[in-house]
Each structure stands twice: as C-alpha cells, then as structure tokens.
Amino acid sequence: MRLSLRTHRVRRVVAITLILAGAVSGLASGARARAQFDRQGVSFQLSQGWHLTIGRINGVIDPVTVFTVSTFRLQRGRTATGVCSAALQRAWRADGAYVQLSEERDGASRKRMLRRVPLRPKHFVLNASGQGGLCTPPDSGGLSFQAGGRAFDVNYGFGPSASRATRVRARAMLDAMRITPRK
C-alpha cells in the first residue's frame, strides 16, 4: 500500500512538472511568435503589440474592409453608420496608431479606381494630411493604390505621442504585405 501511494505521488509530481514545463514553453514561444494574417489573397505578419480586427469598424460597406490593425484593442459595439468609426474613436490613445486596408470590389467602381490610382508603392509613405477616412485626429491620412488588378485604400492615424518605432512598424507591415490577384 505504501509503495502504491508513493508511486502515485511521484507520477503526480512528474505530470505536474511536465504540464508546467509545457505551459512555460508555450508562453515563451507565444511571446516570440507573431500572428500571420492570410485572407482573400492578402497576407502580412502582424507586428508585436498590435491588434488585428477583421471586418468593418464603421458603416461603410463598399469598399470592403479587409482588416484594421491598431496598437490598442477595438471593442466592437453595434455597427456604426457612415464613415466614422465609433469603436476607433472610443479606443483612441495619444500614443496609439491604426492602419486599415479596404478593397474596392464593385465591378464598375473598381474599374474606375484602377484607371486613376497608382500602382502599389515599393515603400509606403504615411505622411499624415488630416484626411484619414475614419474621422480620426489630425495626424491621420489615406492613400489609394492598385496591385494585381485589385484596388485598395489605406486609412491610418497616429496619436500625437506615437513613437517613431510605432510609425516604422506601421509602414513595415504595409511594405511587407503580399497581395495576389483575385481568382
């Protein structure tokens, strides 16, 4: 009986040790790992510390929002109407930033846009002009481009205290983004 109880305790200690080792290992690798976004022919690696929101955060249906990334979490409420994003405005932080990619998918609108917008730049320049499309603070902007026969808009914004590193990460995510032609 004594040997059986001792064996049971040893097995229990070993099991707990293995579970804890696995959890610590998982946390360590999760801290290094970055999320990969790959959807509808658009892919990029999410920078550490940024949060991904898929789907609309405002009332605009077309162009279609592909994703929004931000340095803060967006809490979705009821779907907003119009171009302003109440979720983005509620979550906005002085040291924060966001980047949103949307795609023009309507046939006639897409054809018109493809005739007037430039090809995708090799390196994105996020010079805020106060013209961000989501009703965000003055240090925001927007730009349009085409890639693979597809037409896109980028809206972005930086808080007045956003670091240079935050701005660099936003550009780096866009620069590294891969876009394949629609099938």
Image (cartoon, rainbow, N blue to C red):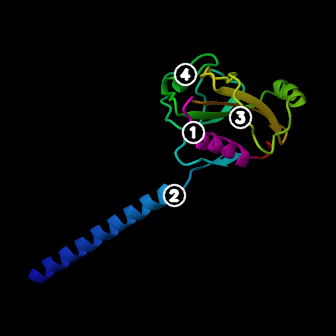
Residue lying at 54% horizontally and 42% vertically, measured from the top left: 50
- Between discs 3 and 4, the one toward the N terminus: 4
**Local crowd at mark 1 within 10 Å, few (<14), some, or many (≥20)?**
some
Q: Quadrant of the N terminus?
A: bottom left
For the residue marked with disc 1, what is the amino acid?
Ser
Q: Which residue is mark 1?
A: 163
Distance in Å between CA atoms under marks 3 and 4: 28 Å
**Local crowd at mark 4 within 10 Å, few (<14), some, or many (≥20)?**
some
Is there any visible trace of residue 39 in the rendered image?
Answer: no
Asked whether 144 falls inside the magenta stretch, the response is no
Q: Is residue 13 left or right of residue 55?
A: left
Using the image, determine if residue 53 lies above or below residue 142: below
In-front residue for pair 8/42: 42
Q: Position of residue 159 (x, y in %)?
A: 56, 30
- Between discs 1 and 4, the one toward the N terminus: 4
Q: Position of residue 53 (x, y in %)?
A: 56, 36
Which label number is shown at residue 79? 4
